[in-house]
Image (cartoon, rainbow, N blue to C red):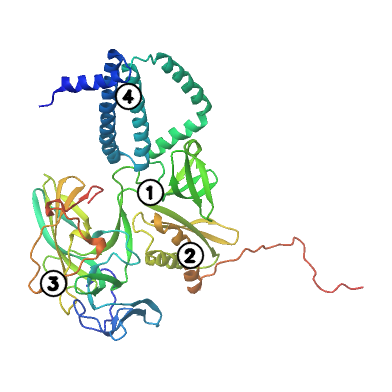
Amino acid sequence: MINFSWILETVINAFTSLGLSRDLALRVFIALIILAVGYVVVKIITRITSRILLKLYPRQMTIIVLRIIYYSLLFILIVLFLTSLGIDVSGLMLAGGFAGLVVGVALQPVLANVFAGLYIMAEKVVQPGNAVEVGSVSGEVISLSIMFTRIMTWDGIIVTVPNNLLLSSMLKNYSKTMARRIEITVPIAYGEDIEKAYKVIREVIDKYPYTLVEPSPDIFVSSAGDNGLIVTIRAWVPRQYYYQAVKDLPWLIVKAVSNAGIEIPFPQLSIWFKTPLNLGPTSK
Amino acid sequence: MSVHGICRDYGALGMYGIGVSGRINIGDNIIEYDGARSRYRRMSRDGSITVSLDLQGEHSIVAEPIHSLYIPGFNTKYMLVELVDRIVVPPNSSVGFFIKTPVDLGVFMVGRDFYKLIDVAPLLNYYKYTLYGPLASLEEVSGILCRHWRSRSYNGKTSVEPGECLVEAEVVNELGDSIIVSKILVDASYMPLYYEINTFNCYAGKIRMVVKSRGIGEITYPRIQPPQGYLKADVPAELRPPPIPIIAWKTEMIWGL
């Protein structure tokens, strides 16, 4: 059986041999025990918390929160350690608090970004791989850190957006819906069979694999334009095929309408002269 | 008779389960396997090559039915079968019928201890997708992208054409009021396909829809014996069911029946 009083006596004797008083040696011994046990407790708490947080939040955010918890607990442990040694930490705490205030004010923009980053990660406002538009920047989110969100624009430029700006701006996330609507307008010359044009366009939409059956596509004459009737086509496509459909559908529709012998008018201007115009040679 | 367009021209009388060699007409496509050069090709009738593969190692090429979820690309494991004739189920009763689901021709490279889907040859002319449920995916429960298909309901077992697979369906109405069923959502990963060798006959087992509240149904996939002489088709990686007990194999229809 372990003889605790013998261990205690041996350790205190060892400390006193170093020149410490018996009272101080006891305090150092207790402080070291607090530090050792406390460190193990901090590790256990961090590990349990990480398991819980990983189930609830993204990995990146969990790591940040864990670091905050870990260092806060470590700070408390050091305060306990110093207190148990008999060191008065109230002055240190006061100075620390004041320093914290100064640093907090100085780092206000940084902290705003940090908290915005935490919010974005927790709420999954954007995630890597999302197609987004923030202000004038449009592209794909490639990475998300505590301070910045990096977006690769459609023409391949990497834009670093501070998280605070991301949160305070109007943000369009195109990846939060299952499908997107594509809208195409086709002018059909006056005098052409508009019913036939409708059937031809309908056939193209029905045959194209990426246009969804539901929500159903819509084809209608939206206005009488300067050069012909404007037929508007609205169809929903899975979001991952939106760009493909934007490239394919206008071309397929124009080709099908032309192949059916239906005229797509080009912009033209008719000028009527109020008085007869003599275009013959002028007599001298 | 089929609801959707189905390719009519087949060079072979039956395809499923046979080893592929030489040239075979599959609707608008020709598949060709040159065993001496281990080269697989699929081409269209005008001669343009769609797929060309150089296959290495000891293997054979086998064609089997595969759920029609791979054309133009694999996007979903769900199929929404819209019933041409909606089915009215009286209160506290069940009805049984057959429907057809779409299949294509899966070309597998089969080795001693592996198989790999290398190509999917279309057997149909209708490849459309639809959304079941809401557009937004902000909530945990969002709409589902599904392969769209229309099928008649049949009172008994009926013949299938290439590109079709027969499914036994049962709708159980537990409500005190009659219900109308217009569509059935199925998860293809829970529906293994069975085929009769050297034919285009295909069977996809049984589905059971239980309606406990209005507009909401639960689809389960009871295991039943396939018809005599039918073989189980290989399952591509995308459609392998999770390794959990069969009791958990179910699909919820919460956005209307």
Instruction: Using residue B123 as the reference point, say whether residue A95 is left or right of it.
Output: right
Coordinates of residue A176 in the picture (x, y in percent): 39, 47
- Mark in the foreground, 3 or 2: 3
Q: Residues under labels 2 and 1: Cα distance?
A: 34 Å
Residue on which the image places disc 3: B231
Residue A219 is at least partly visible in this image: no
In the picture, which quadrant includes the C terminus of chain A? bottom right
Instruction: Using residue B127 as the reference point, say whether residue A2 is left or right of it.
Output: left
Residue A242, image quadrant: bottom left
Front residue of this view, candidates B133 and A158: A158
As shown in the figure, which amino acid type bears the numbered disc 3?
Leu
Instruction: Using residue B68 as the reference point, say whether residue A100 is left or right of it.
Output: right
**Same chain for the residues under marks 3 and 2 in the image:** no
- Secondary structure at numbered mark 1: loop
Residue A93, image quadrant: top left
**Same chain for the residues under marks 3 and 1 in the image:** no
**Same chain for the residues under marks 2 and 1 in the image:** yes
Coordinates of residue A115 in the picture (x, y in percent): 43, 33
Chain containing mark 3: B
**Same chain for the residues under marks 1 and 4 in the image:** yes
- Mark in the foreground, 4 or 2: 4
Instruction: Using residue A53 as the reference point, say whether residue A177 is left or right of it.
Output: right
Residue on which the image places disc 4: A77
Q: Residues under labels 3 and 1: Cα distance?
A: 40 Å
Q: Residues within 10 Å of mark 3 (few under 14, many from 20)?
A: some
